[in-house]
Image: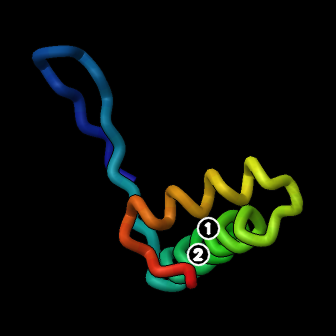
Amino acid sequence: MNAKTNAKTNAKTQEYTISLSQRLIAGSLSLMIGLTLIIGTGFAQDIAVHNGAHDTRHAMGFPCH
């Protein structure tokens, strides 16, 4: 990690490197959470939640039936 000092604002910024395996884990977890939300609302028993998700999918051009 590198710490740099910005003379204009006196703020320190840090550079982080993330390995490929860490990026794949983060992407996989994000995908699983997203799919859980989409599928969970699609099969929800509450009609208001289901209809809201259904209309949102159609608005984004996502075919759902």
Residue of label 1: 34
Q: Which mark is residue 31?
A: 2
Q: Quadrant of residue 51?
A: bottom right
Q: Residue furthest left?
A: 8
Q: Position of residue 52 (x, y in %)?
A: 62, 51
Q: Residues within 10 Å of mark 2 (few under 14, many from 20)?
A: few
The N terminus lies in which quarter of the figure? bottom left
User: Of 43 and 12, which appears nearest the observer?
Assistant: 43
Q: Residue furthest top?
A: 9
In the displayed structure, 16 sits above or below 40; it is: above
Q: Quadrant of residue 53?
A: bottom right
Q: Which mark is residue 3?
A: none
In the displayed structure, 23 sits above or below 60; it is: below
- Relative horizontal placement of residue 46, taking residue 21 as reference (left or right): right
The C terminus lies in which quarter of the figure? bottom right
In the structure shown, which secondary structural element does the residue marked by tag 2 occupy? helix
User: Of 12 and 50, which appears nearest the observer?
Assistant: 50
